[in-house]
Image: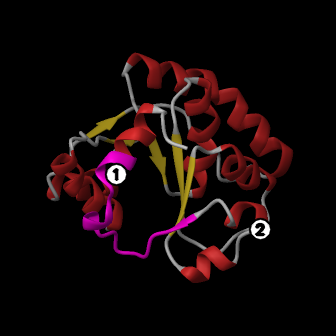
Amino acid sequence: VSSVMLMQELPYFGFRPIALVHDAGPLTKYLSSKGVEFLQTGLPYLDPKKSGIKALVHSVSIAPQIATFVRRNNIALTHVNDGRMIGSWTFSTLLARRPVVVHARQPWSKSRLSYACFRVASGRIAISSYVHNSMPDKIGRKTTLIANPFQAMVIDQSRAQAFVSGSAE
């Protein structure tokens, strides 16, 4: 819900958000009902049955295909907010030399892949102090707390534009 709210408000700040979904399903129906633009990609994504080194290897193995998609479609910024999508898109987006924002919605789980993705991400968001406080110190210090649901009025347009253009601190 908060992601949809964010996507509905971003055009007022000069952004054109497009949700990328891997397959048709309940999410595509929901996005359509809310008038949110989306693209069904058919791209590979992290297998939820894989963990540990197998998950890391799988994430890296799908990165070139997703990175090519990101470059070809001139995606300026990727924002991911689900464990599988974080594992699927973080390395891919960085390989495409684009910024990626990872969005923590659940208490921290001890996953080396999650840790690596959060460490290399361009930006990090936690939806609550509960989620934020569960993060390892190195991750938590670099994570912004934005309470759910997202309120677009708190966006600093110049900082957002600088972040997307790569000129932010």
Q: Is residue 134 above or below residue 7?
A: below
Q: Secondary structure at mark 1?
A: loop
Q: Residue at x 34, y 69 (%)?
A: 150
Among the 4 quarters of the image, the one containing residue 83: bottom right
Left or right of residue 159, residue 136 in this image: right
> For the view shown, which residue lies furthest in the right direction?
53
The quadrant in which the N terminus is found is bottom left
Specify which label sits upstream in the sequence, 1 or 2: 1
Q: Which amino acid does the dot numbered 1 rest on?
A: Gly
Q: Residue at x 24, y 51 (%)?
A: 10
* Residue 108 coordinates in the image, percent (x, y): 69, 70
Nearer to the camera, 59 or 123: 123
Q: Which amino acid does the dot numbered 2 rest on?
A: Pro
> For the view shown, which residue lies furthest in the bottom direction?
130
Tag of residue 136: 2
Left or right of residue 73, residue 135 in this image: right
* Marks 1/2: CA–CA distance: 34 Å
Nearer to the camera, 18 or 25: 18
Q: Secondary structure at mark 2?
A: loop
Left or right of residue 19, residue 112 in this image: right
Alpha-carbon neighbours of circle 1 within 10 Å: few (<14), some, or many (≥20)?
Answer: few
Among the 4 quarters of the image, the one containing residue 136: bottom right
According to the picture, the residue beneath numbered tag 1 turns out to be 25
Q: Nearer the viewer, mark 1 or mark 2?
A: 2
The quadrant in which the C terminus is found is top right
Alpha-carbon neighbours of circle 2 within 10 Å: few (<14), some, or many (≥20)?
Answer: few
Bounds of the magenta segment:
144-159
